[in-house]
Image (tube, helix red, strand yellow):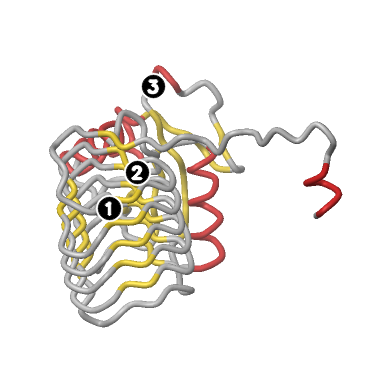
Amino acid sequence: MNANKKIVIFGVSDFASQVSSYLKQDSDFEIVAYTVDAEYNKIGAFLDLPVVDFEKVQEIYPPSEYSMFVAIGYHKLNSSRETKFNEAKAKGYQLITYICSRNSYWKDLEIGENCFIMEANVFMQNVKIGDNVIFAIGNKIGHDSVIDSNCFITSNVMIGGFCSLKKNSFIGMSAVIKDKTTIGEFNILGAGSIILKNTRDRSSFLTKSTPLSFDPNNLIQDFI
C-alpha cells in the first residue's frame, strides 16, 4: 500500500486511543489530527491533537496529502464503521491498514483497506481478508480461509482451514469454527461458542455463563 504516511483518525473513543498507541509505537504513520461528525465534536482536541469536523476534514487535510483510518468498533454489527469507511472513500481518502509487527503470516496474505490487526495473530497460507476488518490479539486463522469485509474478530478465536466468514459478523472471545465452515452475514458468535456447521445470515450463537457452584463450607476455596 502506497498510502500517505500522514493520517487523520476518525474517532475519539477508547478504541481510537488504542489505535493511536499502536501506530505511534509500531508504525511509520504520523497522526496529525482526529475527526468526528460536527454534532459530536465537543472537545476540540484529543491526545494533544486537533479534532476537526468530518464534514470539513477534506478542506483542512486534503486526501491528496493525507490518509485516514476509521477507528470505530463493532457498533451495530460493524455497520457504523462500514458507513464511515464508505463516506471517507467518497471524500477521496485512502484508508490505511495496520498489521502489528508481532504477528505471524505468510507472504501470500491478502488484506484490504482500513484493517487493524493487533499482536499474536497467526495466519496460515492463502488467507484473504476484505476491507474494514478488525482483529484483536491471539487469533489463529486456518489456511485458505476468507474473511469478508466489516468483520470484528476479538481474541483467542480459532478458525479452521477453508472457512468463509461473511460480511459484518462478530466473533467473540475463544470461539471455535470448524474447518470448511461458512459463517453467514451479520452473525454473532458469542464468547466460547463452537460452530461445527454452516450458519444462516443474521444468526446469533450465545453461550451461557458458568453457574455459581454451591459451596456453603468453602471447601473449594480451602482446596485451592
Q: CA distance from mark 3 to mark 2?
A: 16 Å
Most distant residue in the top direction: 39
Of callouts 1 and 3, which one flags the residue occurring earlier in the amino acid sequence? 3
Q: Quadrant of the C terminus?
A: bottom right
User: What label sits on residue 38 in the rendered view?
Assistant: 3
Residue sitting at x 61%, y 43%: 48
Q: CA distance from mark 1 to mark 2?
A: 8 Å
Tell which tag, 1 or 3, sits nearer the viewer: 1
Of callouts 3 and 2, which one flags the residue occurring earlier in the amino acid sequence? 3
Q: Secondary structure at mark 1?
A: loop
In the rendered image, residue 90, in percent from the top left (x then y), is placed at 15, 39
In the rendered image, residue 149, in percent from the top left (x then y), is placed at 20, 49
Q: Pointer 1: what residue? A: 95
User: What label sits on residue 70 in the rendered view?
Assistant: 2
Tell which of 179 and 78 is nearer to you. Answer: 179
Displayed quadrant of residue 203: top left
Q: Secondary structure at mark 3?
A: helix
Looking at the rendered structure, the kind of residue marked 2 is Val
